[in-house]
Image: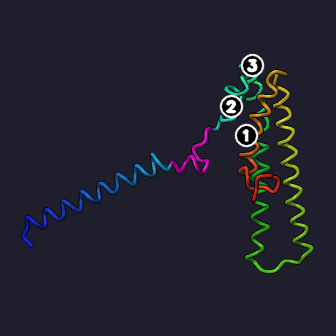
Protein backbone atom coordinates (compact mmCIF):
# COMPACT_ATOMS: atom_id res chain seq x y z
CA UNK A 1 0.00 0.00 0.00
CA UNK A 2 1.24 3.45 -0.82
CA UNK A 3 1.43 6.12 1.87
CA UNK A 4 -1.37 8.16 0.29
CA UNK A 5 -3.76 5.17 0.23
CA UNK A 6 -2.85 4.39 3.87
CA UNK A 7 -3.69 7.98 4.79
CA UNK A 8 -7.01 7.79 2.95
CA UNK A 9 -7.87 4.54 4.74
CA UNK A 10 -6.98 6.02 8.14
CA UNK A 11 -8.96 9.19 7.46
CA UNK A 12 -11.93 7.08 6.35
CA UNK A 13 -11.76 5.01 9.54
CA UNK A 14 -11.50 8.14 11.70
CA UNK A 15 -14.54 9.67 9.99
CA UNK A 16 -16.54 6.44 10.49
CA UNK A 17 -15.57 6.31 14.19
CA UNK A 18 -16.44 9.97 14.64
CA UNK A 19 -19.88 9.50 13.05
CA UNK A 20 -20.47 6.39 15.17
CA UNK A 21 -19.57 8.26 18.37
CA UNK A 22 -21.85 11.15 17.48
CA UNK A 23 -24.74 8.76 16.80
CA UNK A 24 -24.17 6.98 20.13
CA UNK A 25 -24.14 10.27 22.00
CA UNK A 26 -27.35 11.34 20.29
CA UNK A 27 -28.98 8.01 21.09
CA UNK A 28 -28.11 8.09 24.79
CA UNK A 29 -28.58 11.79 25.43
CA UNK A 30 -31.43 12.80 23.17
CA UNK A 31 -33.45 9.75 22.21
CA UNK A 32 -33.10 7.21 25.01
CA UNK A 33 -33.18 9.51 28.07
CA UNK A 34 -31.94 6.87 30.53
CA UNK A 35 -32.01 9.31 33.46
CA UNK A 36 -35.73 9.92 33.07
CA UNK A 37 -36.47 6.24 32.65
CA UNK A 38 -34.58 5.24 35.79
CA UNK A 39 -36.09 7.96 37.93
CA UNK A 40 -32.77 9.74 38.30
CA UNK A 41 -32.90 13.36 37.43
CA UNK A 42 -36.48 13.47 38.66
CA UNK A 43 -37.58 16.84 39.96
CA UNK A 44 -37.24 16.75 43.77
CA UNK A 45 -40.09 19.28 43.94
CA UNK A 46 -42.30 17.18 41.68
CA UNK A 47 -45.13 16.87 44.18
CA UNK A 48 -45.01 20.60 44.93
CA UNK A 49 -45.20 21.31 41.20
CA UNK A 50 -48.16 18.93 40.86
CA UNK A 51 -49.88 20.54 43.84
CA UNK A 52 -49.36 23.99 42.36
CA UNK A 53 -50.29 23.16 38.76
CA UNK A 54 -52.85 20.36 39.12
CA UNK A 55 -54.49 21.08 42.49
CA UNK A 56 -54.01 24.88 42.28
CA UNK A 57 -52.41 25.26 45.72
CA UNK A 58 -52.05 28.88 46.80
CA UNK A 59 -48.68 30.20 47.96
CA UNK A 60 -49.87 29.82 51.58
CA UNK A 61 -50.87 26.20 50.98
CA UNK A 62 -47.52 25.51 49.32
CA UNK A 63 -45.82 27.01 52.38
CA UNK A 64 -47.81 24.63 54.61
CA UNK A 65 -46.81 21.73 52.36
CA UNK A 66 -43.12 22.67 52.56
CA UNK A 67 -43.35 22.96 56.36
CA UNK A 68 -44.96 19.53 56.59
CA UNK A 69 -42.40 18.08 54.22
CA UNK A 70 -39.51 19.62 56.12
CA UNK A 71 -40.81 18.25 59.44
CA UNK A 72 -41.34 14.73 58.15
CA UNK A 73 -38.77 14.13 55.42
CA UNK A 74 -35.96 12.97 57.71
CA UNK A 75 -38.23 10.48 59.46
CA UNK A 76 -39.49 9.10 56.16
CA UNK A 77 -35.94 8.71 54.83
CA UNK A 78 -34.82 6.97 58.03
CA UNK A 79 -37.75 4.56 57.78
CA UNK A 80 -37.03 3.74 54.13
CA UNK A 81 -33.33 3.29 54.88
CA UNK A 82 -34.07 1.04 57.87
CA UNK A 83 -36.49 -1.06 55.85
CA UNK A 84 -34.01 -1.36 52.99
CA UNK A 85 -31.20 -2.40 55.36
CA UNK A 86 -33.40 -4.95 57.12
CA UNK A 87 -34.54 -6.37 53.80
CA UNK A 88 -30.93 -6.73 52.62
CA UNK A 89 -29.98 -8.40 55.91
CA UNK A 90 -32.94 -10.77 55.52
CA UNK A 91 -31.99 -11.79 51.98
CA UNK A 92 -28.29 -12.02 52.83
CA UNK A 93 -29.16 -15.24 54.66
CA UNK A 94 -29.53 -16.82 51.23
CA UNK A 95 -25.77 -16.56 50.84
CA UNK A 96 -24.58 -17.19 54.40
CA UNK A 97 -26.08 -20.60 54.94
CA UNK A 98 -29.12 -22.01 56.61
CA UNK A 99 -31.18 -20.17 59.18
CA UNK A 100 -33.69 -21.79 61.48
CA UNK A 101 -37.32 -21.42 60.49
CA UNK A 102 -38.10 -19.56 63.72
CA UNK A 103 -35.27 -17.06 63.14
CA UNK A 104 -36.40 -16.58 59.53
CA UNK A 105 -40.00 -16.04 60.68
CA UNK A 106 -38.82 -13.53 63.29
CA UNK A 107 -36.88 -11.52 60.71
CA UNK A 108 -39.79 -11.64 58.27
CA UNK A 109 -42.05 -10.38 61.06
CA UNK A 110 -39.60 -7.56 61.75
CA UNK A 111 -39.68 -6.61 58.06
CA UNK A 112 -43.47 -6.69 58.06
CA UNK A 113 -43.61 -4.46 61.15
CA UNK A 114 -41.22 -1.92 59.60
CA UNK A 115 -43.25 -1.90 56.38
CA UNK A 116 -46.47 -1.45 58.38
CA UNK A 117 -44.97 1.44 60.36
CA UNK A 118 -43.79 3.11 57.15
CA UNK A 119 -47.15 2.66 55.41
CA UNK A 120 -49.05 4.08 58.39
CA UNK A 121 -46.66 7.04 58.58
CA UNK A 122 -47.07 7.74 54.85
CA UNK A 123 -50.85 7.37 55.15
CA UNK A 124 -50.95 9.97 57.94
CA UNK A 125 -48.58 12.22 56.00
CA UNK A 126 -50.92 12.19 52.99
CA UNK A 127 -53.93 12.75 55.26
CA UNK A 128 -52.25 15.85 56.72
CA UNK A 129 -51.47 17.01 53.19
CA UNK A 130 -55.10 16.39 52.22
CA UNK A 131 -56.21 18.52 55.19
CA UNK A 132 -54.42 21.50 53.62
CA UNK A 133 -56.80 21.35 50.63
CA UNK A 134 -59.96 23.37 50.33
CA UNK A 135 -63.17 21.40 49.64
CA UNK A 136 -63.00 22.47 45.99
CA UNK A 137 -59.43 21.17 45.68
CA UNK A 138 -60.11 17.74 47.19
CA UNK A 139 -61.19 16.00 43.92
CA UNK A 140 -58.13 17.42 42.13
CA UNK A 141 -55.88 16.40 45.02
CA UNK A 142 -57.30 12.89 45.09
CA UNK A 143 -56.68 12.45 41.36
CA UNK A 144 -53.13 13.78 41.71
CA UNK A 145 -52.42 11.67 44.78
CA UNK A 146 -53.57 8.55 42.94
CA UNK A 147 -50.90 9.21 40.31
CA UNK A 148 -48.29 9.61 43.04
CA UNK A 149 -49.39 6.40 44.75
CA UNK A 150 -49.22 4.47 41.48
CA UNK A 151 -45.62 5.63 41.06
CA UNK A 152 -44.84 4.70 44.67
CA UNK A 153 -46.35 1.22 44.50
CA UNK A 154 -45.58 0.15 40.95
CA UNK A 155 -46.94 0.25 37.47
CA UNK A 156 -50.60 -0.14 36.61
CA UNK A 157 -51.52 -3.43 35.02
CA UNK A 158 -49.19 -5.68 36.96
CA UNK A 159 -51.21 -6.24 40.08
CA UNK A 160 -53.78 -8.92 40.87
CA UNK A 161 -56.63 -6.40 41.04
CA UNK A 162 -56.47 -5.29 37.43
CA UNK A 163 -59.69 -6.53 35.75
CA UNK A 164 -58.14 -6.18 32.27
CA UNK A 165 -55.25 -8.47 33.11
CA UNK A 166 -55.08 -11.66 31.05
Mark 1, residue position: 147
Q: Earlier in the sequence, mark 1 or mark 2?
A: 2
Instruction: Give yes or no for contact between labels 1 and 2 (Cβ–Cβ under 8 Å).
Output: yes
Q: Earlier in the sequence, mark 2 or mark 3?
A: 2
Q: Quadrant of residue 97?
A: bottom right
The stretch of residues the image draws in magenta is 33-43
The circle on residue 60 is 3
Q: Tell which tag, 1 or 3, sits nearer the viewer.
A: 1
Q: Using the numbered discs, state the Cα–Cα distance from disc 2 to disc 3 in whole angstroms.
A: 15 Å
Which secondary structure lies at badge 2? helix
Q: Position of residue 14 (x, y in %)?
A: 24, 59
| Coloring basis for residues | rainbow
Q: Quadrant of the C terminus?
A: bottom right
Instruction: Give yes or no for contact between labels 2 and 3 (Cβ–Cβ under 8 Å).
Output: no
Judging depth in this view, the residue of 69 and 38 nearest the camera is 38
Q: Tell which tag, 1 or 2, sits nearer the viewer.
A: 1
Judging depth in this view, the residue of 151 and 40 nearest the camera is 151
Left or right: residue 119 compared with residue 153? right
Left or right: residue 77 compared with residue 108? left
Q: Using the numbered discs, state the Cα–Cα distance from disc 1 to disc 3 in whole angstroms.
A: 24 Å
Q: Quadrant of the N terminus?
A: bottom left
In the displayed structure, would residue 89 be above or below residue 81? below
Q: Position of residue 100 (x, y in %)?
A: 88, 78
In the displayed structure, would residue 32 be above or below residue 104? above
Q: Position of residue 133 (x, y in %)?
A: 81, 24
Q: Residues within 10 Å of mark 3 (few under 14, many from 20)?
A: few
View extreme (bottom): residue: 98
Amino acid sequence: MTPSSKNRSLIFLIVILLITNILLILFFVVLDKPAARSGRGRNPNGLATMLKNDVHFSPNQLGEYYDLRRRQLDSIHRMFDGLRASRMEFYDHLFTGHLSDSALEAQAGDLAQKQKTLDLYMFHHFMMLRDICTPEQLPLFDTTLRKVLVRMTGRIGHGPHNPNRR
